[in-house]
Amino acid sequence: MVTKPRNRWWPWAAIGCSIAVAFTLSMISPADSVQGDLVRIMYVHVPAAWLAYTAFIVTFAGSLWYLLTRSLKADRVAAASAEIGVFFTGLALALGMIWAKPTWGVWWTWDARLTLTAIMFFVYLGYLALRRTTDDPVARASRASVLGVLGAIQIPIVHFSVVWWRTLHQPPSIVRPDGPSIQDPMMLVALIVGVLAFTVVYVSLMVKRIELGHLDDQRRAAEQSPDRPVAGEAVTIPELGAKR
Amino acid sequence: MTTGFWHQVRAVVDRDLLRERRSGDVLWITIPFGALALLLVPLAVGTDAELLREIGVGMYWVVVMLFGVLVAVGKASRETLPQQDASSLLGLDPAAGFIGRTASSTVLLLAFEVVVGIVAVGLYNIDVLGPGWLILTLSIAAIGLALLGTLTAAIVNSSSAGAALVPLLVAPLSVPLLLGATQAYDGLRYGHAILSWVLLMVAVVVVVAMIGVLAARPLQES
């Protein structure tokens, strides 16, 4: 039997409130002395990139958890996180391109960070495509979890690409051994609040997606149940000799 | 099959190489196709000898990575479900099967790299620098690509979209190998240290090998 979905209001409220706060802060923070108002794109681009990493790390953890315990719940966590991670990676790439055109003069440049992020995007698109190749939840979980672990190789390479190669993309500006390179406290606060707001969005979407995955598995199980209604069940056999 | 682990590996290698000897897929199809790709590049980018010499190594590695997927996956995915069931019933250790298939793919990939490499040197006038490092880089790339191809083929095995999906999965995952190989050659050319690039490739090989061996049984059972 398929349970009814819980109509939770709090994820949507949390998403709305956190985005509103982050948007307000990003608008009242000062314009950059070099980039001008273009810097405001960074208040979405940077949190999206961070959440993409977080999402793929959770996919790795969920996949490993599945391989160790064979719990379908772990697979649902990994799958939900990968879907959201692909969305955030796409968002970070798109916003980066919009920012790059007026700043660097091109939509795309063959910078190590950009190229490797695009490749990471395709790795997880492949992960999602793999999940669609079978309906059997156990087979799907087993195959996807191996790829979920394997795909995580890309994460440190993307992250350290700005350190390993001399790139156009700027190096880390917040998590640095000698402290954040952003001097204006208002800008720093807007960026950190942006990250927190996106984290709330991520957690809320995860809750909804995991619930949806659970319902989907229940639906598939119900479809394959021996007690399921079969085609033609409503048709009754006419009795011989019955009066019209 | 009650033999030891390494005997099982050897049996899988022998079987795969025998199959290749009979079909000649790599020798007669994939290697000529790779050489043809190298021949087509100058038609697209121009026939400037200096330019071709400059991009030759990169083109060579791109061809190795993209066509190497065909070599690695072709061998690994040719096993049908009844054959897999027969192997399981015979008691073939899934990890031994994985290592055996990887080893046979490595041999074929090395052959592919060498033949296509000779074609690339001839067509693009590439300098062969540091033969020792070159052999090491070629070997690690072959092992890494074979591991990725074998593991990915096992992941998508028996799924309906398997054949179409494998290149999408392997190509992005092989990027660290491509980077390591091309940067190592650039290092040799400009006199820079290349150990870090070789170590990156080795790290990828070790990680993928560990995942492949540990995941062999769950994948077989799925």
Image: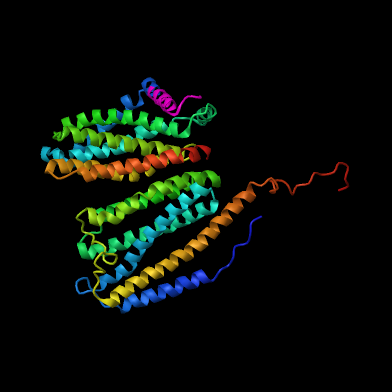
Residue located 20% across and 29% down the image: B118
Vertical side of B55 occupied by A24: above or below:
below
Q: Which residue lies most toward the bottom here?
A: A28
Provide residue A140's location: percent of width, then percent of height: 51, 45
Q: A88 or A63: which is nearer to us?
A: A63
Q: Is residue B9 magenta?
A: yes
Residue located 29% across and 71% down the image: A40
Q: A141 or B137: which is nearer to us?
A: B137
Say whether residue A195 is visible.
Answer: yes
Q: Quadrant of residue B213?
A: top left
Left or right of residue A80: residue A162? left
Left or right of residue B74: residue A226? right
Q: Which residue lies most toward the top here?
A: B22
Provide residue A30's location: percent of width, then percent of height: 26, 78
Q: Quadrant of residue B164?
A: top left
**Magenta region:** B1-17
Q: Which residue lies most toward the front here?
A: B4
Q: Is residue B140 magenta?
A: no
Examine the residues drawn in magenta and state their main secondary structure. Answer: helix
Provide residue B139's location: percent of width, then percent of height: 27, 33
Residue located 82% across and 44% down the image: A238
Say whether residue A111 is visible.
Answer: no
Provide residue A207's location: percent of width, then percent of height: 51, 63
Vertical side of A232 occupied by B68: above or below:
above
